[in-house]
Amino acid sequence: AGGDQFDDLADRTDVIVVVDTCALAQLDGLEASLRRCREKVVVIDHHATADDVGAVQWQDTSGAAAGVMTGEMIEALGWPVDVEIARALVTAVLTDTGWLHFANTDARALRAVARWVETGLRMDELYRRLYQCDRAERLKLMTRVLESLELHCEGRLAVMCIRAADFAETGARLDETENLVNEALRMQEVETALLLVELPDMVRVSLRSRDAIDVSAIAGRFGGGGHRRAAGVRV
């Protein structure tokens, strides 16, 4: 929703819930509106980077995903979890843990997913919907990304970029850049990967690390943030 539409909705609601971020930089155009109605804003987030967004801010940096936290809250309130709710919660966890193979995957997340699968959720069907429904345009964009690959620091740093022209020429959408930064981590020597995406008025940078480099600290120097091994910034 745009600023004016958000203000209208905010005036007519009792509670505003912000999930999976506590950074004003990621809430483009809503900063002033959120400050105005701060007293009824609730935040559920697992990132270390935190701005003063809401009157209630539940931050658990040990959580693998905000979906784990949300599911625990639903269960603590005694609300039923049917297969549709389970699908949403599992999707939140799987997309934040790389289908349970990123370093943030822990027993807490695995137990949560196991509970939700018991509702009758089919993991094979969910996998197809999440990871096997790419448009041809996205694969063309991926080709551009790989062609842009540069290696630095004796192969330990990978830098890739997407220019505005790449979107126009391939027909791909901005949301189809999701997870492309991880492609560089397929190479054994690469420790850190960066993907720079040219937008009309800024460059969005996604940063990923295997272990040694704290990319959230790097992003924080430029006004961004995130996790130790996955972060982002807009410059």
Image (cartoon, rainbow, N blue to C red):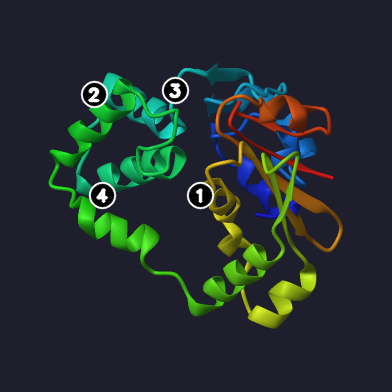
Q: Which residue is mark 1?
A: 186
Question: What SS does tag 2 mark?
Answer: loop
Residue 106 found in image quarter = top left
- Which residue does the image show at 66% across and 26% down from the upper left? 213
Crowding at mark 4 (Cα within 10 Å: few <14, some 14-19, many 20+): few
Of the 4 image quadrants, the one containing the C terminus is top right
Furthest residue to the front?
154
- Which residue does the image show at 64% across and 29% down from the upper left? 22
Residue 143 found in image quarter = bottom right
Spot occupied by residue 84 in the image (x, y as percentages of width and height):
26, 49
Disc 4 marks which amino acid?
Glu
Tell me the mark number nearer the camera, choosing from 2 and 3. 3
Q: Which residue is mark 2?
A: 78
Question: What SS does tag 4 mark?
Answer: helix
Q: Residue 63, labelled with which disc?
A: 3
Tell me the mark number nearer the camera, choosing from 1 and 4. 1
Lower position in the chain sequence, tag 2 or tag 3: 3
- Which residue does the image show at 50% across and 78% down from the upper left? 136
Q: Nearer the viewer, residue 226 or 30?
A: 226
